[in-house]
Amino acid sequence: MPRPESATRVDFRSPDLEDGQHLWRMARDSRVLDVNTSYAYLLWARDFATTSVIATVDDDPGGFVTGYRRPDEPETLMIWQVAVDERHRGQGLARRMLDELVDRLAVDQGVRHLETTITADNSASIALFTSFANARNAPIERTPLFEAAMFPDGHDAELLFRIGPF
């Protein structure tokens, strides 16, 4: 799939119900994310819109970040998924979406920490979140969270990355 030479406009906003199908397609087409049902992405766009972001590139859905505030730690944003459409990769869009979302939630909701889980072999996600922490001069902790044996479907172990305070 050819990449656009240069985007003329990138906009960031909370997803809405119409975006649910785009979130599902981008997750499916990533070929690396765990894909939830299309129903789950519709619910995500409805119920977690304020803690998620979608990027449109020249009015085309280009990427998304889904997250939620941890009920037991409301100052912590847990990132569920980050996806960038293949046509828009290599342009720093994932990092820009993270920055946009965290900056908004830090002001609006007092978010001071970010968490995500990453498998040990996912070098792209490790680089993304390490870069995010470094740019904010925020400490980053990596600890085991879910062992492979905890998953009933052969899923790899997941490490918890905790960044902050920022």
Image (cartoon, rainbow, N blue to C red):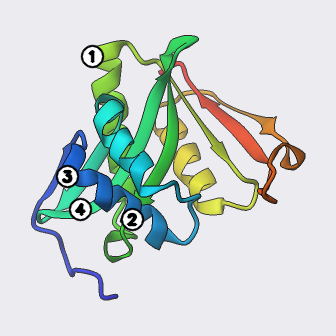
In space, the residues marked 3 and 2 are separated at their CA atoms by 14 Å
The amino acid sitting under disc 4 is Pro
Decide which of tag 2 and tag 4 comes sooner along the chain.
2
The image quarter containing residue 99 is top left
Q: Is residue 18 above or below residue 107?
A: below
Q: State how far apart marks 2 and 1 are (Cα).
A: 28 Å
Q: Earlier in the sequence, mark 1 or mark 4?
A: 4
Q: Which residue is mark 1?
A: 108
Residue with the mark numbered 4? 61
From the image, tell me which residue sits under label 3.
Answer: 18
Verify CB contact (< 8 Å) between mark 4 and mark 3: no
| Residue situated in front as seen by the camera: 131 or 26 | 26
Q: Along the horizontal axis of the image, is 67 left or right of 13?
A: right
Which label lies toward us, 3 or 1? 3
Q: Amino acid at mark 1?
A: Asp
Q: Measure the C-alpha gap from mark 2 to mark 4.
A: 9 Å
Give the distance between the C-alpha atoms of the residues marked 4 and 3, in whole angstroms. Answer: 11 Å
Q: Residue at x 52, y 54 (%)?
A: 36
Look at the picture and state if 145 lies above or below 16: above
Of circles 4 and 3, which is in front?
A: 3
The x and y percentages for residue 77 are: 48, 26
Residue 138, position in %: x, y? 55, 27
Residue 151 seen anywhere in this rendered image of the structure: yes
Residue linked to disc 2:
26
Kind of residue indicated by mark 3: Glu
- The mark nearer the N terminus, 4 or 3, is 3
Q: Quick one: SS at disc 4?
A: strand
SS of the residue under disc 3: helix
**Which residue is more in the foreground, 94 or 41?**
41
Point 21% across, 43% down: residue: 16
Give the structural element (helix, strand or loop) at label 2. Answer: helix
Whether label 1 touches label 4, CB < 8 Å: no
